[in-house]
Image (spheres, rainbow, N blue to C red):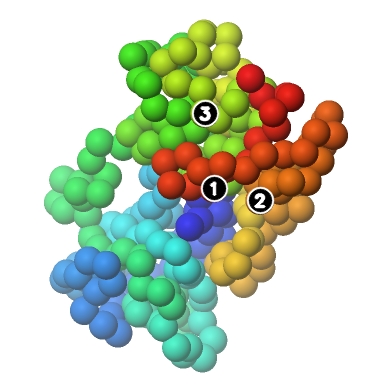
Amino acid sequence: MPELPEVETVRAGLEGLLKDAVIVRVEPHRSGLRRPFGDLSALSGPVRAVRRRAKYLLIDAAKATLLSHLGMTGSWRIGDAPRAHDHLTLHLADGRRAVFNDPRRFGLAALLDAAGHHPVLAGLGPEPLDPAWDGAALRVALRGRKAAIKAMIMDQRIVVGVGNIYAQEALFRSSIRPQRPAGRLDLAACHRLVAAIKTVLNEAISVGGSTISDFVHAGGGTGLFQHRFQVYDRGGQPCVICGAALRRTAIAGRTTCWCPRCQR
């Protein structure tokens, strides 16, 4: 599933392609994906901005905002011939089409309500790249938590946008073992972890995210951060720092790789 860097890459690409374009018609090709689309007819007029909240994309038009989630295999593209699994098309005044495609249909598209809300946005935690989110804020959120720290930083109520890939990479860079009970991290460890999360996410954004199987940008390109993985999917291979064999385990049902020497 695309994580924050992939969604931010799509957002930036879409904004460059759609900013000030005029939506003249919305054409759904089915009734919905994992949730019904609902009435999308209010989405019209100039596109003011394309924003991101957590792993959700928000296309702001003159009279409404379209929320979308890429699910496992979703993508946005501009123009070209229809393809299998095209589920939603935004027709633009200049003749172009913005198309949402999702082979596995785990994605989401719906309008925000008149107050700018949607149930999937309720209860989300802070944005990890917000300067206000720091080690002190993380330590407060983790207080009393017995679950593994990896599971906690993947909990969207604690901090948004950090999935399996970037949680593993950030924990490795901060020398924190992913199984450690979250509530036992001291302030220094929380500061290290927050700094590592920000660094890893920014690095991934700078190279267009990670393409493991299906992820593509709005322009059709792929990400490159998979070439920088230090622990993700490298179980049994040597640690890039100490040479020890990386171990593989499952935490909260997700495969996790870590170094038994470098991470404590």
Q: What residue would you read off at disc 1?
A: 255
The residue lying at 41 percent from left, 16 percent from top is: 183
- Residue 16's quadrant in the figure? bottom right
Q: Residue 91: x, y in percent?
A: 37, 80
Q: What label does residue 179 carry, if any? A: 3
- Residue 64 is left or right of residue 178, and the answer is left
In this view, 82 is above or below 164 = below
Which comes sooner in the sequence, label 1 or label 2?
2
Q: Amino acid at mark 3?
A: Gln
In this view, 74 is above or below 135 = below
- Residue 118 is left or right of residue 219, and the answer is left
Which comes sooner in the sequence, label 3 or label 1?
3
Q: Residue 89: x, y in percent?
A: 37, 79
The residue lying at 47 percent from left, 68 percent from top is: 73
Give how far apart the Cα atoms at labels 3 and 1 are. Answer: 12 Å
In this view, 242 is above or below 163 = above
Single out the residue that lies furthest toward the top: 187
Question: In what quadrant of the picture does the C terminus appear?
Answer: top right
Q: Amino acid at mark 1?
A: Thr
Q: What residue would you read off at disc 2?
A: 233
Whether pointer 1 and pointer 2 mark residues with C-beta atoms closer than 8 Å, the reply is yes
The residue lying at 36 percent from left, 14 percent from top is: 143
Q: Secondary structure at mark 1?
A: strand
Q: Amino acid at mark 2?
A: Asp
Whether pointer 3 and pointer 2 mark residues with C-beta atoms closer than 8 Å, the reply is no
